[in-house]
Every structure is written in structure tokens, then in C-alpha cells.
Amino acid sequence: MADDRPAHYGGEPIRESVLGYGSQSITDHETEAVAEALEGDYITRGPTVDEFETRVADMVGVDHAVATTSGTTALHLAGAAAGFGPGDEVITTPLTFASTAHAATYNDATPVFADIDSHRRTLDPDAVREQITEDTAGIVPMHYAGYPADIEGLLAVADEHDLTVIWDACHAFGGTWHDEPIGAQRDMTMFSFHPVKNITTGEGGMVVTDDDDLAERLRRLRSFDMNYEPEGHDDEPWYQVTEGLGYNYNVTDIQAALGLAQLDRLDEFKQRRDEVVDRYDAAFAAIDGIRTPPEPVDADPMYHLYAIEVRESFGCNRTEFVNAMHAENIGVQVHYVPLHYHPYFQEFGYEPGQFPETEAVYDGLVSLPLHAEMDDGDITDVITAVQRLSTYHQ
Ligand SMILES: Cc1ncc(COP(=O)(O)O)c(C=O)c1O
């Protein structure tokens, strides 16, 4: 008789090789583009970076795109361009990667957490309202897993209190909300092009905005806050001066060439991610104790993660679920340990127990594999592993 026990409980693993929860997709198209860039005159920031920025700005439908070395440095620059500084409070979600809050902390502002709406798993506008003080300078919402946050509700709060909004869209590149690309919303949106993200440049990020002044500050801060043509020095072509504390967050033409080649394949990536999500949704709807991701409302998300919540009625807890999937050679991850659990953010006075909605969601969260390199067999393996585990525990 076939042993259908999960590998964690003595059966044979479903897979021999490990399936990662995320992966880049690189073909000859990208390799050739990068090789060509290496033969160009610039291998640091040059015309290919300009082309990459223009292409993303056009795709998103904004006037400016500023490429940076990572999503984290994009957040640093966006916070700096917004003018966040000592004494300012910046409200964000605890259910995110640490860098989201660094839009505040890298600029010596104070990160302030507000609880999430547990359905969308993104910042709850009413919870944001409760955290507003006279020192609040901005909001940094995050489009968790690619599902748009409550954009309308959050912009309303920003309007009421004259706050700058920086959308962390690291998960959401390529999606739309009300037929408008993610990134078109004011004041700034930033993306990450880390290898597990929707497109990659190895490491890389970008800030997009329609605001000319913000774009000018972003560009200056990205490159040493250097004025390359200061007034009164027309006859001294070498004369360039640093006017403030800037950074070297310049991205290279090599990375931009990779980014452009990835953009050529964006539709293909979206289609494959959609197909994986559709198969997961159909398979998991019938499984007791699994909460599938929320149905998008007025949006066509580019799904970055497929994060389920494992509930008590599934029959085992999240830790056992994760370990059982790993025993099947299926890579799963948890996005994220809430920021108020981290020692660094506890220095700002946070502790577990303060954000019940976030904590209730976190307790069950597991991200299943989702990326454009998955073939039909990979999807079947994930579904079979979850079904096997469910059957074992029912
Ligand atoms: C939500 C979110 N914000 C910010 C970042 C930081 O991006 P990067 O890794 O490109 O610095 C990430 C990625 O890790 C992320 O997932």
C-alpha cells in the first residue's frame, strides 16, 4: 500500500529537489542585454539607466523615475526628499520588511506603527488616524503581496492632515488599481528589483513621482547632493560642489540593461504568476483551515507572494506546517515577523501585544512558492503537499 504520509511524519518527500518560494527568471535575452551593456562606454550610471527610468516612468504614467541601488536606498531617498527628519513621526505598517520603516529611521525620524486591516493585510486608515499627532509628517503604506492597500482611504487621511505619502510597492510592480498603474499615486512610490521581486536588476530600486521638486531632490541626493553647474563658475568647467549630505546610490548601466530586458518579459511574468495563483485558489478553497489571499477589489495585482493563513481547523499549527513543507522539499517563508517584535524597533517603545490584527494574521502566515519559473509540475507538487498534510491532520 502506498505510504501517503507527509514526509515530516515518515513518508517520502514529494520532491527530490528544493522548490524555492521565489526566484528570478533569466534567459538569453537578459544575458545578451547585459553583455552588450558591458561593451558600452559607461558601465556606471549612463544612458541605459536613463532609458530604464524613462521606460518605467512611461509604464507607470508619471513624469519621473529615479533608479537607486536597492529598494532600501529608494526608501531612504524618498524619506529624505519628503523632508523627514528629527522630531518627525512617520506612520507605517508593522507587517512589512524592516526597510519600509527605514524611510523614517534612516532620516532620523521616528517610525510609528499603526495596525493593519486583517482582510487586506495592509495599513488600516482608521488605525493611522489614531496615531496622528502634531509631529506626523508622512505615511508609508505597503502593498502587501502585491494587493493594493486601501489607497483611497489612506490618501483621505493624508489629505486631512497634509501628509506626504510614500507607497512601498516593492511587492506590487506591474499591477494596477482602478485601471491606474501602481506607482501613479501621489506623492511617491518606490519599487525593489531584488531577485525575488516581480522583475530584477540583481539589486536595485526606483522611486517614481509626478512632482518635479521631489524628483530633483531625489536625483541630487542619489549622487552626493552635487551641484554640477554651480552659479558663477561658467568659465571653470571642472567646478562642482556638494551642497548637502548626499549619497552614492547610483545604479549601473549593466543593471539597467538587465532591468530593460526584464521589462520586455513583464507580461509573461504576470501571466505565469496569475496562473499559479488561479490554480492555488481553486485547490485551496476546499481545504478547511486555510485562508487564501483576499480577492482583489477594483485591482489587477501583480501577485508577488501567495501568503495563506493556516488556521486552527487545519489541524496543525503554522510551525508544523512550515516544517512539513520543508520536509517535502518545498520552500516556504513567512512574510513577515512584525516589526514591533524586532529588538531594533522595540528601542522606539514597541512590544508584542500592541497590534492585535497584525499579530492574528502573522500567527498563521505562510508564503507558498510563487514565481515565473514554476512549471505545472511544481504547482502540482505544492498543492499535493498541502492536500497531503491536510488529509493527515483531518
Ligand atoms: C516590502 C519591502 N520593502 C522594502 C524592501 C527592501 O528592498 P531591497 O531588498 O531592494 O532593499 C523589500 C525587499 O526586501 C520589501 O519586501
Image (cartoon, rainbow, N blue to C red):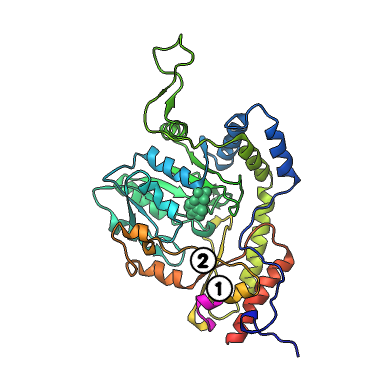
| Mark carried by residue 8 | none
SS type, badge 1: helix
Residue type at mark 1: give it: Val
Query: In the image, which residues are magenta?
Result: 314-321
Query: From the viewer's perspective, is residue 25 above or below residue 247?
Result: below
Looking at the rendered structure, the number of numbered marks drawn on it comes to: 2
Q: Residue at x 47, y 37 (%)?
A: 210
Q: Residue at x 42, y 46 (%)?
A: 166
Q: Residues within 10 Å of mark 2 (few under 14, many from 20)?
A: some
Q: Is residue 389 visible?
A: yes
Q: Residue at x 45, y 49 (%)?
A: 167
Residue indicated by mark 2: 334
Residue 38 is situated, as x and y percent measured from the top left of the image, at: 68, 34
Foreground residue, 254 or 90? Answer: 254
Asked if the beta carbon under badge 2 is closer than 8 A to the nearest atom of ligand 1, the reply is: no
Residue 171 is situated, as x and y percent measured from the top left of the image, at: 53, 54
Residue 64 is situated, as x and y percent measured from the top left of the image, at: 51, 35
Within the magenta stretch, is there residue 318? yes
Residue type at mark 2: give it: Val
User: For the view shown, which residue lies furthest in the bottom direction?
Assistant: 1
Q: Is residue 187 visible?
A: no
Foreground residue, 101 or 116? Answer: 101
SS type, badge 2: loop
Within the magenta stretch, is there residue 258? no
Q: CA distance from mark 1 to mark 2?
A: 9 Å
Residue indicated by mark 1: 322
